[in-house]
Image (cartoon, rainbow, N blue to C red):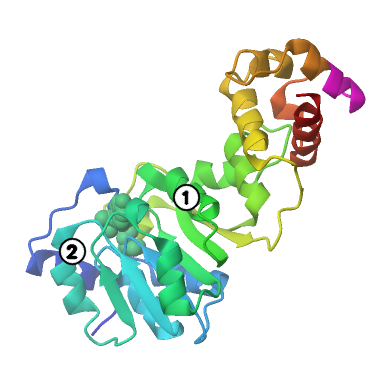
Amino acid sequence: MEKLSNPKKTIEIIQKYGFDFQKRFGQNFLIDSHVLEKIIEAANITKDDFVLEIGPGIGTMTQYLAEHAREVMAVEIDGNLIPILEDTLSEYDNVSVLNQDILKVDIGAIAKEKNDGKPIKVVANLPYYITTPIIMGLFESKVPMDSITVMVQKEVASRMQVGPGTKEYGALSLAVQYYAKPYIVANVPPNCFMPRPKVGSAVIRLTKYQKPPVTVKDEKLLFQLIRASFNQRRKTLQNGINNSNLNFSKQQVVDALDTMGISPTIRGEALTLEQFARLSDLLYESK
Ligand code: SAM
């Protein structure tokens, strides 16, 4: 079959099945072969790999993945796309499609069954309305994973990559960088999709760390502190933490900051991951 990355082929399939794009599922299908090749290259897919694709749509990227990987599993929520995928992927015997909501799938069980519990690769042109829950869900579930290579909203890609002192820096930057090394592979303009999204997009590769770059006594506390610090961005760290439901007094925060040689009026947006980790341990010890 001719590749679906050819816009004419995509239109032909959409018309053949009378498919209606669902905005609520974030359906913007890729129609640019260069972008698809870039994603495959950045994900470094080989014939040893088991790849999980989130949201195959009509199977445009799945065709590329099937050609490069040992095995692909594609999870698609929209039941109307299932018969289409049966057609567009009929030439490939190494692809299976699961009609489910990715947020409800036990990915750990899939990795165990399909890849002997070895690290999987996740590749997707993500539905933008659930980018963060998908990525954080993958990291927090502790699924054995080599990397996540995904198309996301451009602004979200830069939030994942930046460090302190920039206005995009926040809880997402710290959470992602605790688990993985981010690298923005390419910016992708709206005309590479059908229909065109209203926002710019970017491909980002998140290479999972074997071990987080910082070690803390209580991981949950670290994430609670990060969230509390950015919930009220304009507040000082001591006020942000004090106004959250964490049980630390302003004095405890000031004392911890003092031990770290940091001004008591600092805001969370100025702290590195290493500093958040140290603060977390000092507060943990002060309990
Ligand atoms: N991979 C295709 C491509 O690049 O052309 C489609 C990408 S489109 C941006 C996102 C896809 O994710 C759609 O097919 C949509 O139906 C699917 N999707 C949306 N929410 C989902 C969910 N919760 N679980 C699984 N798939 C979902």
The residue range painted magenta reads 255-265
Q: Amino acid at mark 1?
A: Gly
Q: Does the beta carbon at disc 2 come under 8 Å from ligand 1?
A: yes
**Residue at position x 56%, y 69% in the image:** 42
Q: Which mark is residue 81?
A: 2
Task: Give the percent coordinates (x, y) of residue 83.
Answer: 13, 70
Q: Is residue 257 magenta?
A: yes
Q: Is residue 193 magenta?
A: no
**Is residue 163 visible to the viewer in this orientation of the structure?**
yes
Task: Give the percent coordinates (x, y) of residue 29.
Answer: 30, 59
Label 2, label 1: how far apart the Cα atoms are: 24 Å
Residue 229 vertical placement versus 171 (above, below): above
Chain-order first, disc 2 or disc 1: 2
**Residue at position x 82%, y 16% in the image:** 254
Q: Which mark is residue 106?
A: none
- Pointers 2 and 1 in contact (C-beta within 8 Å): no
Q: Amino acid at mark 2?
A: Leu
Q: Secondary structure at mark 1?
A: helix
**Residue at position x 52%, y 41% in the image:** 155
Residue 222 vertical placement versus 240 (above, below): below
Task: Give the percent coordinates (x, y) of residue 148.
Answer: 53, 62
Q: Which residue is the site of mark 1?
A: 137
Q: Quadrant of the N terminus?
A: bottom left
Residue 237 vertical placement versus 145 (above, below): above
Q: Report the side of 89 relative to 238 (left or right).
A: left
**Residue at position x 73%, y 35% in the image:** 164
